Amino acid sequence: MADDRTYPKTANSLLEHTRRQREEVAALLELWTDIFPDNFAPPNKGQFRTWLDLYDFAIVVKGLTTAANRFGRRAVEAQEDDDTEPMTKAEVIKYASGVMKITKMRSAE
């Protein structure tokens, strides 16, 4: 797979990219705390940076909100069915990543 990311070409553009990414990570962390239960800790900042390296900010937001909706539905199912377990953080990350990948592919069509 070809690397289609654009890397900063100057020190100033690198600093701007880093500042913008810090702000986006902070916003995504705040979103996480708003859409998941208090006892469901967010992934580390590196995971958010990886998503932002691969996907536009809006796609990451869509992936997280879609995963949060699935998380909520599965939590209800787990309460109603002894064979169903709530989603783990790893499952949420994988689900969100899948949503992001599909969204990016569809937007490229």
Image (spheres, grey):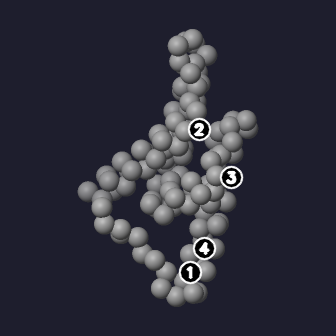
Q: Position of residue 32 (x, y in %)?
A: 64, 47
Mark 2 / mark 3, whichever is N-terminal: 3
Quarter of the figure that contains the C terminus: bottom left
Crowd tier of the residue under label 1, counting other residues whose Cα lies within 10 Å: few below 14, some 14–19, many 20 or above:
few
Q: Secondary structure at mark 2?
A: helix
Which numbered marker is on residue 62? Answer: none
CA–CA distance between discs 2 and 1?
Answer: 31 Å
Residue that mark 2 sits on: 89
Nearer the N terminus, badge 2 or badge 1?
1
**On-image quarter of the N terminus:** bottom left
Disc number for residue 30: 3
Report the residue that reaches farthest toward the right.
38
The residue beneath circle 4 is: 18
Residue positioned 35% across, 68% down in the render: 3
Q: Amino acid at mark 2?
A: Lys
- The amino acid at mark 1 is Leu
Q: Is residue 13 left or right of residue 1?
A: right
- Residues tagged 4 and 1 counted as in contact (Cβ below 8 A): yes
